[in-house]
Amino acid sequence: MSYEILKFIHLISMLLLIGVGTGSAFYKYMSDKKGSVETIVHINKQIVLADWIFTTPSALIQPISGVALAYTLNISLLTPWLLISIILFSFSGILWLFALYLQIKMRDISIKALESNQPLPNSYYHYAKIWFYLGIPSFFTMFGVFVLMVFRHHF
């Protein structure tokens, strides 16, 4: 595969990771703030679906295409900027796995509340708060990876 195609795939997968994550955080925050259980259920379902359709494939493509690019450019994975990128990406991935678990849990809790015509329990808002706070370092670590990718020649 050519360098240009690998780079395109790598950049698109990074855009999807950052874009879908940021969009999910925005819509989830706004729907939780509104408080409508029906809206919350809808958004929670869409966020989980978006993670399966966009985030998961991108999270798998990103390291594969990154290693392929390093190999194509004859760059060692121990090159400082690349090693830092790998560490940040891995850390963000761990946070994302916890967030994904919470997303599924919140989706199920909200569906149960809607079906039983009950308000959301306090546990839902507790999980939502944890989910939101997991997203902050996850976003900044992924943004850091992006900066290292773009400005690698300066490090």
Image: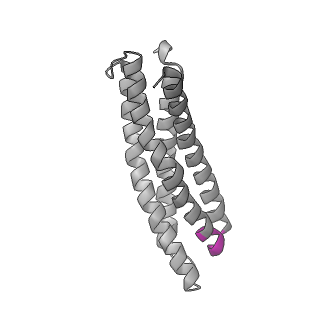
Front-most of residues 90 and 35: 90
Q: Residue at x 35, y 18 (%)?
A: 79
| Total count of labels | 0
Q: Residue at x 38, y 28 (%)?
A: 67
Residue farthest toward the bottom in the current orientation of the protein: 116
Give me the residue at 53% from left, 59% from top. Answer: 49
User: Compared to 102, does 133 lie above or below?
Assistant: above
Closer to the camera in the image, 94 or 57: 57
Residue 47, x across and y down, in percent: 56, 58
Q: Position of residue 136 (x, y in %)?
A: 51, 45
Q: Report the magenta stretch's main SS.
A: helix
Q: Residue at x 42, y 29 (%)?
A: 66
In the image, 36 versus 70, the foreground residue is 70
- Relative to 30, is 75 above or below? above
Q: Position of residue 19 (x, y in %)?
A: 59, 43
Q: Which residues are magenta?
A: 35-41
